[in-house]
Image (cartoon, rainbow, N blue to C red):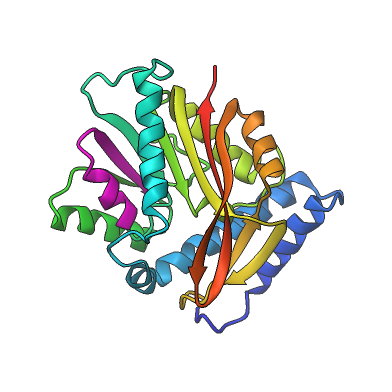
Amino acid sequence: MSTDDPPPPALVKALSAVTEAQQGARVDESALARSVDEIVRWTAGSYSQHAGVYSAVRGVEPGTWEEPLTQLLLATVRHQIAVGRAPRPVDRRWRLVDIGAGSGRDLVRLALEPDVDAVGVDNAPSLVSHLRTLLAERGLPGTVIEADMRDLSCLQSGTFHCVRNHASLHHLPLVGPGLGMDVAIAESRRVLVTGGVLYVLTRAGVGLEMRDTGEGLGPRPFQLLTSSTLGALLERHRFAPLRTEIVQSRRGGGTIDWLLCLAEATA
């Protein structure tokens, strides 16, 4: 699969079915579920095939615009614990799961925090291998699991203080309860303690589309979200927003609008 190849017919059909459903057309639920699965399968395969390019593009240091977001995440979780909104960790290290850990750049950054027990999750096999090697080479603690963000059954319920979803949720379609993003957010709520923090950074906008981000990875499916669509999604799964804002980054001479949300897991 070259980055210059057109999307395969199965992916085009899946994207079309999801788009029709989002626009209000009646689509058979089983066919819609298969379409979501196809989008997830293709995206994971694309990242796995281009794992080397992706890791090289991401580099080893967080971007200057991203470090303040990491600091905000850390401060928010620590505040929730300090004021009793979230339970104190029994061993003084609170647990964080990084969904779509990808190149591992951010997982390494988080694993360096003395009070954080970081777990990385990704569904691209080549990236999982890369992540495990990266942590081992650096002698860092941390666990890496190959899993789909819609099925975190490998993780126990109510055992994490933070679920971090940095630029990965947007590869899942938003099609309503029981499918796609809704399942992923439900799983995030399941593994979080009450008072825990869900961190989401996703592309801002409207609709499902194929986008080439100019990083040598070719076009990939992106589900764009507004603050209202993300807010409604989180509310369906017992999250109360703590902070929502648009964050901008620069890439290739252009500006990218990101939607940032930190939300508290409620009872």
Q: Is residue 193 above or below residue 247?
A: above
Q: Is residue 193 above or below residue 245?
A: above
- Of 226 and 28, nearer the camera is 226
Residue 20 x, y percent position in the rendering: 81, 57
Q: Quadrant of residue 14?
A: bottom right
Left or right: 148 as drawn, with respect to 206: left
Residue 79 x, y percent position in the rendering: 38, 26
Asked if residue 165 lies in the magenta stretch, the reply is: no
Residue 140 x, y percent position in the rendering: 17, 48
- Of 30 and 64, nearer the camera is 64
Query: Residue at point 33% right, 53% down?
Result: 106
Query: Residue at point 49% right, 44% down?
Result: 149
Q: Is residue 176 above or below residue 235?
A: below
- Of 187 and 78, nearer the camera is 78
Left or right: 117 as drawn, with respect to 67: left
Q: Which residues are magenta?
A: 105-121
Farthest bottom residue? 4
Query: Residue at point 58% right, 28% down?
Result: 239
Residue 149 in view = yes
Q: Quadrant of residue 118?
A: top left
Residue 146 in view = no
- Of 200 and 2, nearer the camera is 200
Farthest right residue? 25
Residue 230 x, y percent position in the rendering: 65, 42
Q: Is residue 111 above or below residue 203?
A: above
Q: Quadrant of the C terminus?
A: top right
Q: How many marks?
A: 0
